[in-house]
Image: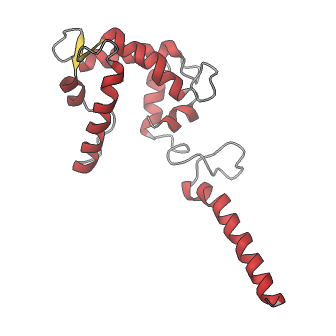
């Protein structure tokens, strides 16, 4: 290997390593990530004050302290349950759960709708603590206060920040 080709090989390795390390931050676009200086790195929607997740976060953050605690999430889950319980029976069936579409609806996409229905089917069984085929309000609220809150609270401090909330995909 000549001295020139060795330099070229080293330069390519350094460039590739840099692209791998830095590329995802730039690919995410502006967002104001912590420690990123130029507003890069937090992902789509973090720098957008109109992002749909922000309205959802503000709705759950009842005391407006900028974080969501377990009690706030459980209160919100109770309201969501009430909206899903179409026959006001005090329990939701899988069909009732699948029938509700929450969040922004940006057009019709059959593949995405099928994917979302499959996700709902997968989430229903773990909420049905007594395995009777329906989810009571107590089961729904407990699941969201325990399982869902723990998933969102990535650092385990008992508070869900906007970044943790957004990373959870709500």
Kindly indicate the quadrant of the structure image that contains residue 2: bottom right
The foreground one among 150 and 65 is 150
Q: Position of residue 13 (x, y in %)?
A: 72, 72
Q: Is residue 14 above or below residue 119?
A: below
Residue 157 in percent (x, y) is at: 64, 21
- Give the quarter of the image for residue 86: top left
Q: Measured from the top left, where is residue 16 in percent x and y?
A: 67, 69
Q: Residue at x 20, y 23 (%)?
A: 96
Residue drawn at the location 74% of the way across and 70% of the way down? 14
Residue at image x 58%, y 52%? 30
Total count of labels: 0
Query: In percent of the image, x 63 and y 46: which residue is there?
Result: 32
- Measured from the top left, where is residue 155 in percent x and y? 63, 28
Image-based side of 152 in relation to 141, left or right: right
Tell me which colouring the rendered structure shows. Answer: secondary structure
Task: For residue 102, say whether it is visible.
Answer: no
* Quarter residue 133 falls in: top left
Relative to 123, does residue 51 appear above or below in the rendering? below
In front here: 58 or 25? 25
Q: Residue furthest left?
A: 87
In the image, residue 42 sits, relative to residue 138, either above or below, namely below
Left or right: 70 in relation to 11: left
């Amino acid at each position: 290997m000549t001295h020139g080709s060795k330099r070229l090989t080293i330069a390519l390795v350094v460039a590739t390593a840099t692209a791998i390390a830095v590329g995802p931050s730039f690919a995410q676009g502006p967002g104001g990530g912590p420690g990123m200086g130029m507003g890069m790195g937090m992902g789509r929607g973090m720098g957008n004050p109109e992002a749909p997740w922000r309205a959802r976060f503000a709705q759950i953050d009842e005391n407006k302290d900028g974080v969501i605690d377990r009690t706030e999430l459980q209160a919100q889950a109770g309201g969501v349950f009430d909206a899903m319980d179409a026959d006001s029976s005090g329990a939701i069936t899988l069909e009732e759960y699948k029938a509700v579409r929450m969040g922004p609806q940006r057009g019709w996409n059959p593949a995405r709708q099928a994917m979302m229905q499959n996700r709902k089917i997968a989430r229903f069984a773990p909420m049905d603590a007594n395995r009777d085929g329906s989810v009571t309000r107590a089961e729904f609220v407990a699941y969201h206060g325990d399982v869902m809150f723990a998933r969102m609270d990535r650092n385990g401090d008992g508070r869900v920040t906007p970044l943790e909330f957004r990373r959870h995909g709500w």
